[in-house]
Image (cartoon, rainbow, N blue to C red):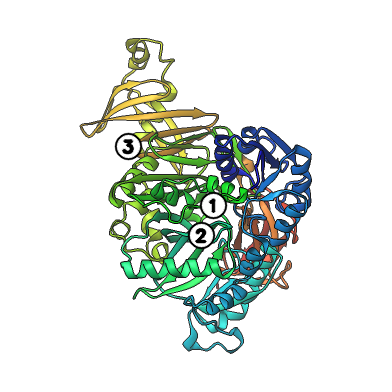
């Protein structure tokens, strides 16, 4: 038995904060590590002690196992928890932690190593009798093998993954997947297997101790994914026949026993439309979506990880599950713009009470370019699936999120979509419905009026008569304000008391009450610098004040390609140089930001007249990358 006293978390953000919460409850002191951009991050402020990892890029900081071990020893920690991502599935790091005399909060390094390569893991699982998809050799693939899924042998999170539906695109997809895998994991090995259309992503949480006990803690469904990364997860996976659940549980336990597993892990399966399960991979760490399992089984998986690491034996059987839990990942990204990540200041992150919120941010924090853009995980638990889904949608709809574009509206619409409500789940959900889920923004007119009234309103201490009295002068001349929202300019002309279809009931700088088409509505307003945020039951809107006179510097040369976000240029199309002919939609260069690659495409057919960047160069948002001169039509 080991008695732990101090825990270093070799991670950052939300998962570090979540682990610290449990560590404190168990009486452990906590140690954080941080890169330079994270010097004032929430996980640093939340820990008892923090150690700097000089630099900004993950390769120089959170992926430097030697620096992390040095930090643990210097701070007096006696254990290291890797969280998820970064070094969490690095067997070499686990061995180095143990060699330094520290307790590793994770499975044995040999088990990590056995499952680290998806290709080798599949060989082990085949020997253990776990059902598998047969691999396809890309060199001999035929049209009969299509569609194919290319996957990185190392790592996960959707990196190095491509779907190929045309043999002519196979070589390019292999090269791109291999390059992305090498950049993300230091290993460019890629393999191919059949891509299952409309399959479900179902996984089993396992927990094992050093005394031979292995728990299968139910199933989770994680089918709603974007770019092969999960968006909404739930437990238990709905609609599975009991025989299939039993098969999945038994296969997960067999996978764990095959590698003498200890601690928390997840065995992931692809379930076909006709109910056949196939092993995908085993994640030898805590999963992002572990809170839904915790809610259903009323467990703290991090506490159990720590107890297992101390040598405690698990009871022979796990507790019985109750109810249903759903988790949504709230990201700083724009789903309507190819899931483009957002950076900048998060002015407000407020989610109504009664739900679990795991986050690494508070009001005023900065979302930077170096890390995943997830802002928070929001989790609900209720006796039934319908109640849990409804509560989660309501919490997200009522959240106040200011400063950055988020996927909040997509999450709400997904949870309320008829297919999701009916548990008709598969990994193609967003391929089919993204346009519908991101289109049709709510009418901004009432919110724009509320913004204008809030701007004009004096302090709330003034009596109502005083607040409205000044506006009553020259009633024949309406007040005018101009805003920009979602790329469109609006000119708001209003009388403070009467407006077509809308009656003003009250107005202060932060709350405007309107009667809209006979229905009383409250509009919460927050003014920040040049932006005004308006939240109501009709939707959330961000308005930017439009200056009376445009800035001539806002104009750019026609055909200019600007960086859609700050990031690093990781690839430039082969042979691309000034004078090169390009065609509409041709990828010209690849920009990496927040763990994702984004293609910069030619806006039109013509000639590249300027290329202002090179591979490896970091660029700011709005930086001029290249210029394409459109060919003239005869």
Query: Considering depth in this image, is 614 or 362 the residue closer to the camera?
Result: 362
Q: Are marks 2 and 3 in contact (CB under 8 Å)?
A: no
Task: Please name the residue shown 40% across and 51% down the image.
Answer: 319
* Mark number displayed over residue 313: 1
Mark 2 or mark 3, which is nearer to you?
2
For marks 3 and 1 on the same chain, the one whose residue lies earlier in the sequence: 1
The residue that disc 2 covers is 213
Image vertical order of residue 302 relative to residue 146, above or below: above
Please provide percent x and percent y for residue 81. Answer: 64, 48
> Which SS class for mark 1?
loop
- Between the C-alphas of marks 1 and 2, the distance is 8 Å
Image vertical order of residue 383 relative to residue 176, above or below: above
For marks 1 and 2 on the same chain, the one whose residue lies earlier in the sequence: 2
Please provide percent x and percent y for residue 52. Answer: 75, 40
Q: Residues within 10 Å of mark 2 (few under 14, many from 20)?
A: some
Q: Residues within 10 Å of mark 1 (few under 14, many from 20)?
A: some
* Mark number displayed over residue 537: 3
Task: Please name the residue shown 71% across and 41% down the image.
Answer: 77
Task: Please name the residue shown 56% across and 58% down the image.
Answer: 211
Q: Taking the image as drawn, is residue 442 in sight?
A: no
């Amino acid at each position: 038995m080991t008695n732990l006293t101090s825990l270093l978390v070799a991670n950052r953000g939300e998962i570090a904060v979540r682990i610290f919460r449990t560590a404190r409850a168990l009486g452990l002191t906590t140690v954080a590590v941080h890169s330079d951009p994270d010097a004032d991050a929430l996980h640093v402020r939340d820990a008892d002690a923090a150690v700097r990892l000089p630099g900004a890029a993950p390769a120089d900081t959170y992926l430097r196992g030697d620096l992390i071990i040095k930090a643990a020893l210097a701070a007096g920690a006696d254990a290291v928890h890797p969280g998820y991502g970064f070094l969490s599935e690095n067997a070499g790091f686990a061995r180095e932690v143990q060699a330094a005399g520290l307790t590793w909060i994770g499975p044995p390094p040999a088990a990590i190593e056995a499952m680290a390569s998806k290709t080798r893991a599949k060989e082990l699982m085949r020997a253990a009798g776990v059902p598998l998809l047969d691999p396809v050799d890309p060199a001999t693939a035929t049209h009969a093998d299509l569609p194919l899924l290319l996957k990185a042998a190392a790592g996960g999170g959707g990196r190095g993954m491509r779907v190929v539906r045309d043999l002519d695109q196979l070589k390019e997809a292999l090269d791109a997947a291999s390059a992305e895998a090498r950049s993300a994991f230091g290993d460019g090995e890629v393999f191919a297997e059949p891509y299952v259309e409309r399959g479900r992503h179902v996984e089993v949480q396992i927990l094992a101790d050093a005394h031979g006990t292995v728990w299968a803690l139910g199933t989770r469904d994680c089918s709603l994914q974007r770019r092969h990364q999960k968006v909404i997860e739930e437990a238990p996976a709905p609609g599975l026949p009991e025989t299939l659940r039993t098969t999945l549980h038994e296969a997960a336990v067999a996978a764990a026993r095959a590698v003498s597993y200890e601690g928390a892990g997840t065995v992931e399966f692809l379930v076909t439309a006709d109910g056949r399960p196939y092993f995908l991979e085993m994640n030898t760490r805590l999963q992002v979506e572990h809170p839904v399992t915790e809610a259903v089984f009323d467990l703290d998986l991090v506490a159990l990880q720590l107890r297992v690491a101390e040598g405690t034996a698990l009871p022979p059987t796990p507790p019985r599950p109750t109810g249903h839990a759903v988790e949504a990942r709230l990201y700083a990204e724009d789903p309507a713009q190819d899931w483009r990540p957002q950076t900048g200041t998060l002015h407000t992150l407020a989610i109504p009470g009664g739900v679990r919120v795991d986050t690494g941010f508070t009001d005023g924090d900065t979302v930077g370019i170096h890390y995943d853009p997830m802002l928070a995980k929001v989790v609900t638990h209720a006796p039934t699936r319908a109640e849990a889904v409804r509560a989660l949608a309501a919490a997200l709809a009522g959240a106040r999120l200011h400063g950055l574009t988020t996927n909040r509206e997509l999450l709400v619409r997904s949870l309320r979509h008829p297919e999701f409500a009916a548990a008709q789940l598969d990994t193609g959900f967003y391929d089919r419905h993204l346009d519908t889920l991101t289109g049709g923004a709510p009418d901004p007119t009432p919110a724009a009026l509320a913004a204008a009234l809030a701007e004009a309103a004096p302090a709330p201490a003034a009596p109502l008569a005083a607040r409205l009295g000044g506006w009553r002068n020259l009633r024949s001349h309406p007040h005018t304000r101009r805003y920009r929202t979602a790329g469109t300019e609006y000119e708001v002309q209003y009388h403070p008391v009467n407006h077509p279809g809308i009656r003003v009931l009250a107005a202060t700088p932060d709350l405007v009450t309107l009667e809209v088409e006979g229905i009383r509505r409250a509009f919460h307003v927050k003014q920040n610098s040049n932006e005004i945020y308006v939240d109501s039951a009709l939707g959330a809107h961000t308005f930017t004040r439009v200056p009376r006179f445009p800035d001539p510097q806002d104009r750019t040369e026609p055909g200019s390609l600007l960086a859609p976000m700050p990031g690093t240029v990781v690839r430039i199309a082969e042979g691309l140089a000034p004078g090169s002919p390009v065609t509409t939609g041709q990828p010209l260069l690849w920009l990496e930001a927040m763990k994702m690659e984004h293609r910069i495409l030619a806006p039109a057919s013509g000639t590249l007249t300027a290329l202002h960047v090179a591979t490896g160069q970091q660029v700011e948002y709005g930086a001029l990358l290249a210029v394409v001169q459109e060919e003239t039509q005869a």
